[in-house]
Image (cartoon, helix red, strand yellow):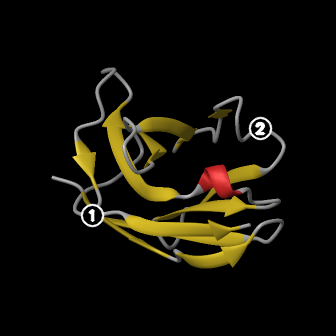
Amino acid sequence: QVQLVESGGGLVQAGGSLRLSCAASGRTLSSYDMGWFRQAPGKEREFVARIRWIGGSTSYADSVKGRFTISKDNAKYTVYLQMNSLKPEDTAVYYCAARHVTVLKYDYWGQGTRVTVSS
């Protein structure tokens, strides 16, 4: 089992920045991908960014490329999502998730942290 706890959400004005954190525990993450997803009101949950624990390769949704950066701290078992140039359409509940590198489905999810961007 992998336990994930997000933090760092809040209210920010458009153009501002926030950094989300996802603290992981339960087992070693060396064979896992860590992802950030978000769900806006009335919309389906969507992929935001991913990082592979070993090697650190990353991928991003087109909507956040150039504005968001996913990173990790190996010692702290924590994944971050640095969000810059925030837009009102970034308003959502952001979720951290984990999946083994051999599967497509993310099996472990955090409780979510709310981000609200005011115009």
Of labels 1 and 2, earlier in sequence is: 2
**Mark 1, residue position:** 111
Left or right: 70 as drawn, with respect to 37? right
Q: Amino acid at mark 1?
A: Gln
Please identify the quarter of the rendering in which residue 83 is found.
bottom right
Q: Which mark is residue 65?
A: 2
Q: Residue 80 at x, y = what percent?
A: 59, 62
Q: Is residue 90 above or below residue 75?
A: above
Q: Nearer the viewer, residue 23 or 19?
A: 19
In the rendered image, the residue lying farthest to the left is 1
Q: Where is residue 51? Give x, y as percent.
A: 57, 41
Residue at the spot 53% in from the left edge and 67% down from the top edge: 115
Residue at position x 62%, y 38% from top?
55
Q: Is residue 73 visible?
A: no
Say above or below: 5 vs 68: below
Few, some or many C-alpha atoms within 10 Å of disc 1 (few <14, some 14-19, many ≥20)? some
